[in-house]
Every structure is written in structure tokens, then in C-alpha cells.
Image (cartoon, rainbow, N blue to C red):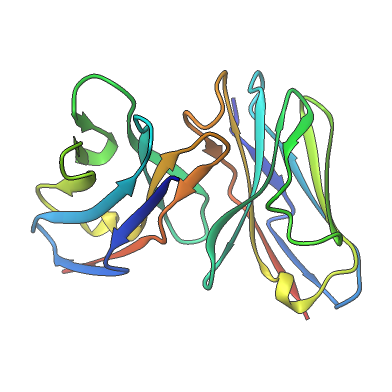
Amino acid sequence: AQSVTQLGSHVSVSEGALVLLRCNYSSSVPPYLFWYVQYPNQGLQLLLKYTTGATLVKGINGFEAEFKKSETSFHLTKPSAHMSDAAEYFCALTGANNLFFGTGTRLTVIP
Amino acid sequence: DAGVIQSPRHEVTEMGQEVTLRCKPISGHDYLFWYRQTMMRGLELLIYFNNNVPIDDSGMPEDRFSAKMPNASFSTLKIQPSEPRDSAVYFCASSLVRVFTEAFFGQGTRLTVV
């Protein structure tokens, strides 16, 4: 069975601080993993994805994520938060018949 | 390409009325998905199509929900009769080539049933 767990439904950081959003997964097959961002009243936009190959994946807007098989994790990071990063972030995992989404983490950036 | 286009963006209807949500996927994408987003349940896959054929509708909550894809460029999600608990944001998404490798989402339809 496949599932995704996002740790922390709300994360607050100061502008300029490190952003760390946590995602752990469970999968019986090699996973494809994604991070999506949702701005208010918008659809989901792909930030980055891991399929195969390099375990450190770079995405848009300065975000990156590292696939760690031993830890079954795919945490999202950004060295320096910007006000425009305030949004909801979803980790997702490909399954045989679905794209499993986590419950989301709302990121607040404090000026 | 303009991306996945959904209409309407907002819909307010009275309980018992029929509601039809529309989606135009990205041209050339073989897969189309309908998702529902609520605070309580997060993002749920309702149904998906491959080459206009429904593949998995196990997420459709009940018989009041139906979805069609008459051609490669258009899909509808219909709720009849609508109920207040159907209030949610409904997203359409499409993907190219292989299912669930990457989905491109529309901006969603916010449905309110009063």
C-alpha cells in the first residue's frame, strides 16, 4: 500500500529563515514523489518531482527536496523564505491507480 | 497552451439542484482526473479517464455523482441532486503519457450548496 504523511499541518518561519517541510512515504515499489504548492484560490502547481536518478531534486522558486530511501523521506527545503512562499504545500506519491496526496502543510512567512 | 481550464470558477446552488462542472484538459494529454478538496478529507481522487474512457471511478462518493468525457478536449462532472455536504473545491487535472507521473491542475471550481 502507498501513503504519504506530512508532519505538521502548519509551519511558520521568519522571512529569510530556512524552510523545512517534512514528508514521509510508504510504498511497496520504487516511488515517484512530488511536491505541489497551492496558493490561495488557485490550483496545485508542481514544485518538483523525483522519479529516478539523482536524489537531490531542484525545483522552481529555489526549493529543493532530497529523496532518502533509508528514511522513507522526501523533505522540502528552501534556504531563505520569502513572503511570496506563503502557501499550502502538498507532498504526493504515485501509486498504481492514484496520485496519493498528503494532508498538506500551510506555510506562513513572518515579516 | 493555456493549461487546464475549468468552469465555472464559483458555483452557488440550492440543495436538490443539478450542478455541472466543466473541464478542458491540456491538448495532447491522455489522462484526465477529477479531484475534490475539502478541509476534512483533503484531496480525493474521484475518477480518472484514459483516452476518454473512465478507468477508475471508485472514488465517486455515490450515484448522485457522474462524469463523462465525450471527447479528448472536454469533460464534465455532474452532481444530481446536490447536497450541502457536496460543498468543496473540485479540481480537474490532466497528464501526458503515463498516468500519475505528473498532473497539471486547473484552478478549480468552488461549489457551495445551500
Q: Nearer the viewer, residue B45 or B112?
A: B45
On-image quarter of the N terminus of chain B: top right
Q: Position of residue B98 (x, y in %)?
A: 55, 22
Can the viewer see residue B36?
A: yes
On-image quarter of the C terminus of chain B: bottom right
Of all residues shown, which one is farthest toward the bottom? B114
Which residue is found at the position 21% from the left and 47% from the top?
A: A75
Can the viewer see residue B19?
A: no
Q: Position of residue B15 (x, y in %)?
A: 86, 78
A91 to A12, vertically: above or below: above
Which residue is found at the position 47% from the left and 47% from the top?
A: A100
Left or right? Give the position of A52 relative to B43: left
Left or right? Give the position of A30 relative to B64: left
Left or right? Give the position of B53 relative to A68: right
Q: Position of residue A46 (x, y in %)?
A: 40, 39
Which residue is found at the position 90% from the left and 68% from the top?
A: B81
Which residue is found at the position 23% from the left and 19% from the top?
A: A53
B87 to A61, vertically: above or below: below
B57 to B28, vertically: above or below: below
A59 to A6, vertically: above or below: above
Instruction: Say which quarter of the image contains residue A61.
Output: top left
Left or right? Give the position of A56 relative to B47: left
Q: Position of residue A1 (x, y in %)?
A: 45, 45
Image mark count: 0
